[in-house]
């Protein structure tokens, strides 16, 4: 007899909104049977990226149902900057808000201090994030979905970078359902179609925008 698949809770982009993430985790961590999958883009733009990474690290260590942290393009931008990347590129991703969350004020020498004092535990957390979560004949979760020109590609470019044509894609589909973040739904409601769900509802990016969680297999939503 086939065992039922573990229930999933897929959490949309956070972007430094630690308060909403903390409220969501207060509910999500209470059910040890649910596996948590986060779509990436935890940092930049919002006010408290540092606390967001602290909360995620604690959740990964404590949650009996397991936690999968997917990498988004903003985590890529942060790691690139820590490795000597350009300030304009990092700033364009909203990176100065992340610097402020670690140092308090951005002043002369702050950017060099940020690189030098960035917590090794947070660096390791970022480096260990994965590109996708996929279950055969069920669901693909990645930050930006997939490349409609090659639905089975699993390169970073295919999974982290935006593919606007994804929302007009008529098939084939790599799995019956794809769940992604990345594409901000300015309505504050998730995009929900038979084969594609987008759970980035602007949390940390748009003022007052909610953090959205998709529950599977019930295919129900909750917002924080």
Image (cartoon, rainbow, N blue to C red):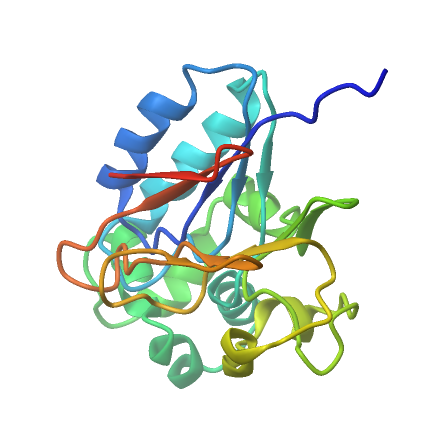
Q: How many marks?
A: 0
x and y percent of residue 2 in the render? 82, 21
Tell me the quarter of the image containing the C terminus: top left
Instruction: Examine the rendered structure and indicate whether residue 170 appears above or below residue 52.
Output: below
x and y percent of residue 175 in the render? 71, 55
Instruction: Examine the rendered structure and indicate whether residue 109 appears above or below residue 86.
Output: above
Tell me the quarter of the image containing the N terminus: top right
Which residue is pictured at 41% across the width and 50% down the height?
A: 12
Decide if residue 18 is on the left or right side of residue 63: left
Q: Residue furthest left?
A: 208
Decide if residue 133 is on the left or right side of residue 209: right
Residue 219 or 199: which is nearer the viewer? 219
x and y percent of residue 80 in the render? 56, 70
x and y percent of residue 3 in the render? 77, 19
Instruction: Examine the rendered structure and indicate whether residue 125 appears above or below residue 101.
Output: above
Give the quarter of the image for residue 88.
Answer: bottom left
Which residue is pictured at 59% across the width and 20% down the height?
A: 65
Residue 125 or 5: which is nearer the viewer? 5
Residue 199 or 58: which is nearer the viewer? 199
């Amino acid at each position: 007899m086939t065992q039922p698949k573990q229930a999933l809770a897929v959490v949309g982009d956070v972007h430094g909104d630690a308060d909403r993430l903390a409220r969501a985790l207060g509910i999500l961590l209470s059910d040890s049977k649910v596996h948590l999958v986060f779509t990436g883009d935890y940092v930049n733009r919002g006010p408290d990226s540092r606390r967001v990474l602290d909360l995620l690290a604690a959740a990964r260590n404590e949650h009996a149902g397991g936690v999968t942290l997917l990498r988004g393009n903003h985590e890529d931008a942060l790691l690139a900057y820590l490795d000597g990347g350009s300030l304009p590129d990092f700033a364009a991703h909203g990176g100065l808000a992340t610097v402020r969350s670690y140092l308090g004020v951005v002043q002369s020498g702050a950017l060099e201090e940020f690189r030098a004092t960035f917590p090794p535990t947070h660096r390791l957390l970022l480096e260990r994030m994965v590109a996708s979560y996929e279950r055969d004949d069920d669901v693909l979760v990645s930050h930006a979905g997939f490349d409609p020109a090659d639905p089975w590609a699993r390169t970073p470019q295919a999974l982290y970078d935006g593919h606007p044509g994804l929302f007009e894609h008529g098939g084939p589909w790599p799995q019956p359902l794809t769940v992604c973040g990345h594409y901000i739904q300015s309505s504050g409601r998730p995009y929900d179609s038979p084969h594609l769900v987008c759970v980035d509802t602007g949390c940390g990016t748009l003022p007052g925008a909610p953090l959205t969680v998709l529950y599977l297999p019930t295919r129900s939503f909750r917002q924080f």
